[in-house]
């Protein structure tokens, strides 16, 4: 099942054409999006996702999103969903047709891909790939839009295809100075003793909504949490490494660059904490 709602909150046919041929989201990848997990009708971490949508819009000089309208649009999709307890909700905003200058916005609901359900259950084999930049480039070159969730995901998808050619499921991007960055669609979380660590957004990575929820829950459970630089060499010495994202939730990296990583037996605990701690949003009226 799939559900589509326009920015004005009306439902549309998900199989009918929606975007114009001159929409800059299509022509140039000029737009932004968010992907939100919905469980039993509750959008998880909706407000952090909306805040990140607004952050990305500002980075691209797009008009500030009407967040109330996006809430209504999201709930239109959620209300119409009949495809099971879990749904992937995408919010998409493009710069719109080149000739009009009016933005295009919509929300779409779809089932959780089977591949991500498998990664939740079985974990991930990943490879490290350089992003070809140092971790201090984002501050020097904001026009690169590192840390914005744009529609321009061609590089991310190419990295995943390269990983698949090497027999892996996913990627951990690294900087040329050896710093861990992020996955193409995920945040990296590392456990060392009683501490959970993740790289800082100043390295040019997305602020992870799911990682933020996990760290809040972990802190309540007695873990120490740190947002700090992580060297690539530290991954092999860590007690555990996970790729964390909205739909995949918490997936353990069991193999990195062909080397087996330890399993501390924490994945189920982390997912349980996350499901308990994420903030379901009541209906917007």
Image (cartoon, grey):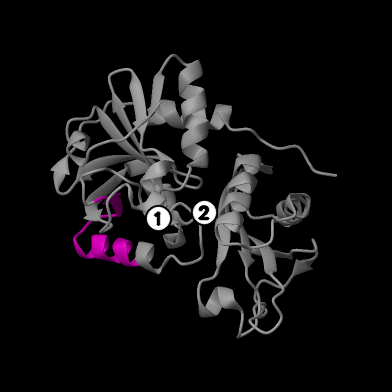
Give the labeled residue for mark 2.
Answer: 112
Coordinates of residue 13 in the picture (x, y in percent): 71, 73
Coordinates of residue 27 in the picture (x, y in percent): 52, 80
Quarter of the image containing the N terminus? bottom right
SS state under label 1: helix
Q: Residue furthest top?
A: 222
Coordinates of residue 111 in the picture (x, y in percent): 56, 56
The residue drawn where x is 20% and y is 34% is 234
Give the labeled residue for mark 1.
Answer: 115
Q: Residue furthest front?
A: 140
The residue drawn where x is 34% and y is 21% is 195
Left or right, residue 131 beside residue 203: left
Asked whether 40 or 34 is in front, the reply is 34
Range of residues picked out in magenta? 158-175
The residue drawn where x is 43% and y is 65% is 153
Confirm whether residue 278 shows in the render: yes
The residue drawn where x is 31% and y is 27% is 191
SS state under label 2: loop
Do callouts 1 and 2 mark residues in contact (Cβ within 8 Å)? no
Left or right, residue 221 beside residue 5: left
| As drawn, 23 above or below 156 | below
Q: Residue furthest left?
A: 259
Coordinates of residue 142 in the picture (x, y in percent): 45, 56
CA separation in Å, label 1 and label 2: 8 Å
| As drawn, 246 above or below 263 | below
């Amino acid at each position: 099942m799939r559900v589509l709602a326009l920015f004005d909150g009306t439902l549309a046919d998900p199989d009918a054409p929606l975007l114009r041929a001159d929409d800059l989201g299509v022509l140039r990848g000029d737009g932004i999006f968010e992907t939100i997990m919905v469980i039993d009708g509750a959008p998880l971490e909706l407000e952090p996702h909306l805040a990140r949508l607004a952050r990305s819009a500002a980075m691209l000089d797009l008009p500030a999103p009407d967040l109330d309208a996006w809430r209504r649009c999201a709930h239109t999709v959620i209300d119409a969903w009949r495809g099971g307890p879990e749904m992937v909700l995408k919010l998409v905003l493009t710069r719109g047709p080149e000739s009009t200058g009016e933005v295009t916005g919509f929300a779409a609901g779809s089932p959780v891909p089977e591949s991500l359900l498998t990664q939740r259950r079985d974990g991930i084999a990943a490879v490290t790939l350089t992003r070809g930049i140092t971790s201090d480039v984002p501050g020097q070159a904001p026009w690169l839009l590192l840390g914005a969730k744009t529609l321009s995901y061609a590089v991310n998808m190419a990295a995943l295809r390269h990983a698949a050619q090497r027999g892996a499921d996913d990627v951990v991007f690294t900087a040329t100075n050896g710093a861990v960055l992020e996955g193409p669609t995920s945040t990296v979380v590392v456990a060392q003793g009683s501490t959970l660590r993740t790289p800082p957004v100043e390295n040019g990575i997305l602020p992870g909504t799911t990682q933020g929820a996990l760290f809040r829950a972990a802190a309540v459970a007695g873990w120490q949490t740190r947002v700090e630089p992580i060297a690539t060499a530290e991954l092999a010495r860590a007690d555990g490494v996970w790729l964390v994202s909205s739909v995949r939730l918490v997936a353990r990296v069991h193999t990195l660059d062909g080397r087996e990583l330890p399993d501390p037996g924490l994945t189920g605990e982390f997912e349980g904490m996350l499901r308990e701690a994420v903030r379901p949003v009541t209906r917007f009226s």
